[in-house]
Image: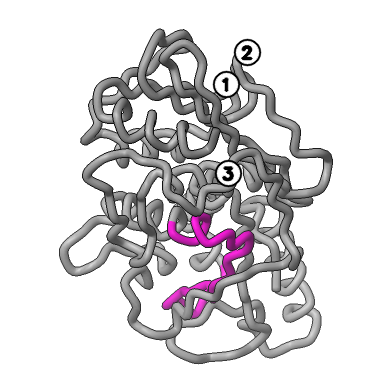
């Protein structure tokens, strides 16, 4: 059965590719998936007749997924009926992010079809969509390690340092850097990373400027992007460290003011921005 399915895919995938997304599938991730599939002239529909039908999320009626209740467990299931090959993928949320399992399932499906995520900014798009020989149809995947994190060392001048800084780069505005952030998050999700930690940055010596409305809005945007790819975003805010523009909690010299600033920083990160403190 598996060999027949692979032969069918090799013959038909290039002729007609349709996709469907669950209603609660994150829009940011949906846009990136559609961009990756764009060379194959995909059609958005819920009822194709022939060809390849990719279903992201478990809301479609023609999916029969069963991946249990374990956090982040996911499944990719393929079946062929009357000239239509349907591949469904979905998963469970993590303790912190709703989309985690579904994102891991999404990128597992894409990798099974030949997409590669070797470089954070340059995903590999195959010349044709063919299920690889290593594809394990219907297998329920469960994480062995509950915490699988990455650290972005913003204290050094890396590609996205300005983004985490809340500032524009030499050649791009802050908003123009967000697509690169989405690519980076997709790379993390493709490797089943569920946490990203970074050091918050601020060049000012005034707490009110480091937690300004503009900064808050930008960090809220980063949290939204991360959650859309199934990743919880953690921030490192030092108490008093003065190193390479690292944001800190303490700016005053008296104990009462220092305690007030610490409370304000914790309230800002957890309450306004929804960043998780490290």
Q: Of helix, strand and loop, which one carries label 1?
A: loop
Q: Is residue 120 left or right of residue 98?
A: left
Which residue is tagged 3? 105
Residue at coordinates 68% horizontally, 90% vertically from top-left? Answer: 253
Q: Identify the residue at the far left of this view.
A: 171
Indicate which disc, 1 or 3, sits on the residue closer to the N terminus.
Answer: 1
Q: Is residue 237 above or below residue 3?
A: below
Residue at coordinates 62% horizontally, 75% vertically from top-left? Answer: 236
Q: Is residue 1 above or below residue 80?
A: below
How many numbered circles are shown? Answer: 3
Which residue is tagged 2? 61
Residue at coordinates 45% horizontally, 84% vertically from top-left? Answer: 155
Q: Nearer the viewer, residue 193 or 204?
A: 193
Q: Of helix, strand and loop, which one carries label 2?
A: loop
Residue at coordinates 26% horizontally, 51% vertically from top-left? Answer: 176
Q: Of helix, strand and loop, which one carries label 3?
A: helix
Which residue is tagged 1? 23
> Magenta stretch containing residue 172, yes or no?
no
In terms of image quadrants, where is residue 151? bottom right
Label 2 Cα crowd, 10 Å radius (few <14 / some 14-19 / many 20+): few
Q: Are marks 1 and 3 in contact (CB under 8 Å)?
A: no
Rendering coords of residue 197 (x, y %): 58, 70
Gap in Å between the C-alphas at discs 1 and 3? Answer: 16 Å
Indicate which disc, 1 or 2, sits on the residue closer to the N terminus.
Answer: 1
Q: Which residues are magenta?
A: 187-207
Gap in Å between the C-alphas at discs 1 and 2? Answer: 13 Å
Indicate which disc, 2 or 3, sits on the residue closer to the N terminus.
Answer: 2
Quarter of the figure that contains the N terminus: top right
């Amino acid at each position: 059965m598996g060999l027949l399915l692979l032969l069918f895919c090799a013959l038909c995938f290039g002729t007609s590719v349709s996709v469907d997304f669950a209603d609660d599938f994150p829009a940011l991730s949906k846009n990136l998936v559609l961009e990756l599939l764009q060379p194959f002239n995909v059609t958005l529909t819920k009822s194709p007749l022939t060809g390849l039908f990719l279903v992201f999320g478990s809301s479609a009626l023609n999916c029969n997924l069963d991946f249990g209740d374990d956090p982040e467990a996911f499944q990719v299931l393929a079946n062929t009926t009357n000239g239509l090959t349907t591949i469904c993928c979905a998963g469970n949320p993590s303790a912190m992010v709703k989309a985690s399992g579904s994102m891991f399932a999404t990128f597992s499906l894409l990798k099974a079809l030949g997409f590669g995520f070797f470089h954070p900014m340059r995903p590999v798009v195959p010349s044709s969509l063919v299920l690889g020989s290593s594809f394990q149809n219907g297998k329920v995947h469960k994480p062995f390690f509950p915490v699988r994190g990455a650290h972005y060392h913003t204290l050094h001048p890396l590609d996205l340092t300005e983004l985490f800084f809340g500032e524009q780069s030499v050649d791009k505005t802050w908003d123009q850097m967000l697509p690169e952030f989405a690519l980076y998050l997709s790379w993390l999700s493709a490797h089943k990373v569920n946490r990203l930690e970074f050091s918050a940055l601020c060049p000012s010596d005034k707490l009110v400027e480091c937690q300004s409305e503009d900064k808050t809005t930008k960090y809220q945007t980063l949290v939204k992007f991360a959650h859309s790819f199934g990743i919880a975003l953690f921030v490192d805010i030092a108490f008093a460290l003065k190193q390479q523009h690292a944001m800190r909690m303490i700016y005053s010299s008296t104990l009462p003011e220092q305690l007030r600033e610490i409370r304000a920083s914790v309230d800002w990160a957890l309450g306004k921005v929804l960043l998780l403190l490290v």
